[in-house]
Amino acid sequence: MNSVEQLESMVADLLAEARKQGASAADAAVSSSAGLSLTVRLGEVETIEHTRDQGLGISVYFGKRKGSANTTDLKPAALREAVSKACTIARHTSEDDCAGLADPRCLANNYPELNLYHPWDLDMEQAKALALETEQAARDYDSRISNSEGATLSTQTGSFIYGNSNGFVGGYPSSRHSLNCVVLAQDGDCMQRDYWYDSRRDWRDLKPAQTIGEKAAANAVAKLNGRKLGTCQAPVIFRADIASHLLRSLTGALRGHAQYRRSSFLLDSLEQQIFPDWVTVTEDPHIEKGLASAPFDNEGVATRPKAIIEQGIIQTYLLDSYSACRLQMQTTGNAGGVRNLAVSSGDLNLEQMLREMGTGLLVTELMGQGVNGVTGDYSRGAAGFWVENGEIQYPVEEITIAGNLKEMYCDLVTIGNDTDIPGSIQTGSWWIRQMTIAGN
């Protein structure tokens, strides 16, 4: 794997080559990573993969004309060829008034150390032992765990460098480690599959193997002997790990590209109230060890913590330089996405929320892609549990839940404090006042 210093040298060479070939401006990003993935199934090692990946992207500008090229070959001749191809493309494209590099005043000339690099000196026997322990914990959890799709341990380290012809060059090493388990439960003719996992920058922060295995097994067993529901209107609680999808729909609608293309259900919604006034949604790219943390975005613009929703009101769109130009605004440092979302939570845990709800649906699984980003119409296959008298009565399956995201956001009753879920989104469970449930 290439070091940060080697990647920095490549970026500098690329930018120099772009100038040599006549480009008025250029930027480049280079990455290199190495990893190990080991899967066991039914007590035996099934696959072992060693990975080494590298890649480079270069964009050049001839005035307001842009060309881009990518390559996975980092040899000097291949780098020169990538620059040449990008220049050829740029010479033949139409001018775009918003084409260009980020405003130099927005670049991250000083940025924080975010503690993202924690390599794991793990030999094959240790990796195998951890994966086996995870799967065995799942298989031992309940006699109804009849089969396994395996437990997988993955570890990866890498480096990333970005630079542009405005004088910015920056980068950092990072790591990511994960452990997951997928098992099948059976009771008579009924079979159900489920999983659990954890993923961290620092391998020492991973949940114990036994915890992950037992959680996967508990999820699968709980789904056995599911029933269908009759079509009805009822309150719905999205379990925390499922509720994160509702936040992704929010940020997708606030992306600058959705706004300037007029393809968002939250079109022209800045400073509008879309949630109850107790809801706050924040982005914090500077969380130490955060899975989505980054000191600068994909254009070298300094990232910063900010409120996206405050007191239920939209505070900002999520812009890169191009979409900001199209909207006549300024970049928000979101080239490449949103980093470490968190939503305000209430005082209730999931069990207390179910008691408060009384009767309704707890959603623990979603299927399909039934979210219309233009209209906000929401219709997805779902599974979960039917709740009566504040307690889970039985699992349900083969249902569809439907509504409209704008109405769902307005009808948010509370968000739970059960925020300890894997990933870069911190949210508790969401209780929506009413949705349509389509069943029998």
Image (spheres, rainbow, N blue to C red):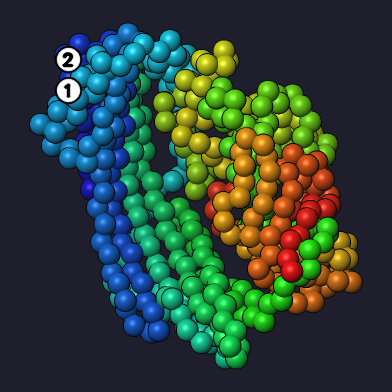
Residue 126 position, x and y percent, is 34, 73
Residue 160 position, x and y percent, is 33, 38
User: Considering only vertical position in the picture, is 325 above or below 370?
Assistant: above
Q: Residue at x 51, y 87 (%)?
A: 146
Residue pointed to by mark 2: 21
Q: How far apart are labels 2 and 1 at the CA level?
A: 7 Å
Residue 262 position, x and y percent, is 59, 25
User: Considering only vertical position in the picture, is 71 above or below 268?
Assistant: below
The local secondary structure at tag 1 comes to helix
Sequence-earlier tag: 2 or 1? 2
Q: Nearer the viewer, residue 242 or 163?
A: 242
Residue pointed to by mark 1: 84
Residue 90 position, x and y percent, is 27, 17
Q: Is residue 197 left or right of residue 187?
A: left
Residue type at mark 2: give it: Gln
Q: Quadrant of the C terminus?
A: bottom right
Q: Residues within 10 Å of mark 1 (few under 14, many from 20)?
A: some
Q: Is residue 285 left or right of residue 63?
A: right
Q: Residue at x 58, y 59 (%)?
A: 367
Q: Quadrant of residue 348?
A: bottom right
Q: Residues within 10 Å of mark 2 (few under 14, many from 20)?
A: some
User: Considering only vertical position in the picture, is 312 above or below 240?
Assistant: above
Residue type at mark 1: give it: Ser
The outermost residue toward the left is 77
Q: Nearer the viewer, residue 207 or 249?
A: 249
- Asked whether residue 252 is in view, the answer is yes
The outermost residue toward the front is 440
Q: Nearer the viewer, residue 322 or 225?
A: 225
Q: Is residue 203 left or right of residue 427?
A: left
Do residues under tags 2 and 1 come within 8 Å of each other at their CB atoms?
yes
- Asked whether residue 420 is in view, the answer is no
